[in-house]
Image (spheres, helix red, strand yellow):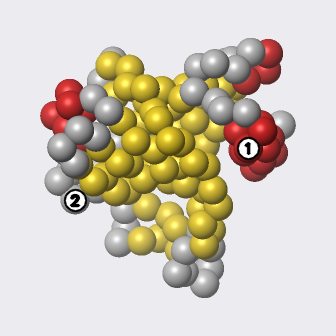
Amino acid sequence: MKHENLLTELIKIQNSKPIQFSLMIDGTKFLLSDTIISEKSTPVTKKTVRGGVYFSDKFVYQIKATIFDSKLANSLSDTMLGPSFEFKALEICVDNVTGKWKPVSIIVNLVNSVQKQSKTELTMNIIKIYKK
């Protein structure tokens, strides 16, 4: 299956029943809540290199999610562009789906995080999805 086909199927399944995802950062597993996968258009008009650091397409699949774990804040500064010179690829696993979805991983780049008192809201661009 192609990248987009897997994502499209995963979005359809998620719309019909809740799927549990987890984010792996430096060997620590964080449970994702309120997870939304969507397609978002970008302001570029053609595929381009952005700042010599990464490629940007006309659209991107994004995952928005919330993590209710205070330990996450210590790990975030190394993953985003800004504090570091390049994105760190992060892995999201599909936890509660059986069959062909169990061995699926989603590789993402963290593009935004909002830290609040009891939670952290994350916005991540999907780089690839693959079966293990």
Percent position of residue 30, x then y:
38, 25
Residue at position x 78%, y 39% from top?
A: 16
Residue at left offset 83%, top offset 37%: 1
Find out whether the residues at labels 1 and 2 contact each other: C-beta distance under 8 Å.
no
Could you tell me if residue 64 is visible in this image? yes
Under circle 2, the secondary element is loop
Q: Is residue 98 above or below residue 11?
A: above
Indicate the position of residue 127 as horizontal and vertical percent values. 55, 48
Image mark count: 2
Q: Is residue 102 left or right of residue 92?
A: right
95 relative to 61, above or below: above
Q: Is residue 2 among the parts visible in the rendering? A: no
Q: Quadrant of the C terminus?
A: top right
Measuring from the top left, give residue 116's x and y in whole percent.
22, 48
Give me the residue at 53% from left, 49% from top: 63
In terms of depth relative to the viewer, which is nearer, 118 or 11?
118
Q: Nearer the viewer, residue 62 or 35?
A: 35
Say the numbered circle drawn on residue 82. 2
Where residue 94 appears, as percent x and y from the top left, is 60, 25
**Mark 1 against mark 2, which lies toward the viewer?**
1
Instruction: Check disc 2 and give the amino acid type.
Output: Gly
Residue assigned mark 1: 15
Q: Residues within 10 Å of mark 1 (few under 14, many from 20)?
A: few
In the drawing, does residue 126 fall left or right of residue 30? right
Residue 107 marker: none
Near mark 2 (Cα within 10 A), the count class, few <14, some 14-19 or many ≥20, is: few
Mark 1 or mark 2, earlier in chain: 1
Q: Secondary structure at mark 1?
A: helix
| Residue at (52, 68) in percent of width and height | 56
Q: What's the distance in space between the residues labelled 1 and 2, CA to CA?
A: 33 Å
> Mark 1 belongs to which amino acid?
Asn
> Could you tell whether 105 is left or right of 9 in the image?
left
